[in-house]
Image: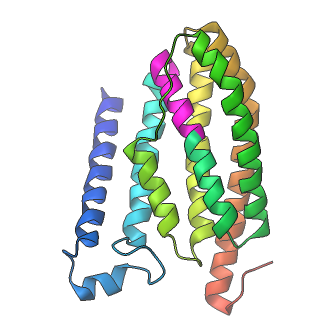
Amino acid sequence: MNRAILLCAAAATALTLSACNKNQATGNSTPADTNATTDTNATPGQSTPINKAQDAAGAAVGSMSAATMGSHDTGAFVTSLVRGNMYELDAAKIAEQKAKSPDVKKFAKQMITDHTKLGAEAKPVIAKAGQTPPTDLDQRLKGMLDNLKAASAADFDKTYMDQQVAAHDETLTLLQGYAKDGSDADLKALASKATPVVQHHDDMAKSLQAKVAGGSQGANNAGTANP
């Protein structure tokens, strides 16, 4: 019951923040408000503080879903796994183009390689399980991509790595849960096989998250990123 309440609260927060973004995008905020909250290099109507809060709320929803339905329900597991993989590929392609840090670009390139492989390996297993995978992202993940695209040049690397830590934490919860409690043997084996790969991604993401956060702070204080 408590988990359900937390999930509903997080979902409500995400929806509220989405509405705030829409209101800004349609010009409902005053010019003074817009100047105070919107980066000049970001997409019009997108506010950095709201986008960050929206990403955090979305991460809470995804984590709760992975820990509950995704951990044992085969349909929910497949949907979350496939959509998470699609998000990883789309986000990495954006990062390859927009990231400043060579390490972040290298990470994004590895995400494309590894998640393309994971998608290819999962496809026949999902079909054998009689499941129909989704063909598009849900609104939560689309919102995260929109926020990534809207990030200013100075904030892009941190935004990407913050999202990556949240996304890989969520996927780890999903894989570990289904490997333990899932009902389809082949999908359980896939989850077990993918877990160490995603754990490695998560470890790299957290290391880079700390690195770009330090570099961003250094740039703010001295005009150049920390080495």
Q: Residue at 75% of width from left, 51% of height from top?
A: 204
- Residue located 49% across and 56% down the image: 145
Quadrant of residue 128 within the rendered picture: top right
Residue 148 falls left or right of residue 54: right
Image quarter of residue 161: bottom right
- Give the vertical position of 176 relative to 142 (above or below): above
- Majority secondary structure of the magenta segment? helix
Q: Residue at x 36, y 31 (%)?
A: 3
Most extreme residue toward the front, as rendered? 135
In the image: residue 4, left or right of residue 207: left
Q: Residue at x 36, y 79 (%)?
A: 37
Residue 210 drawn at (x, y percent): 68, 63
* Residue found at the far bottom of this picture: 222
**Span colored in magenta:** 71-85
**Quarter of the image with the C terminus in it:** bottom right
Q: Quadrant of residue 50?
A: bottom left
Circle count: 0
Residue 78: image location, x then y, percent: 53, 24
Q: Position of residue 225 (x, y in %)?
A: 72, 81
Q: Is residue 112 magenta?
A: no
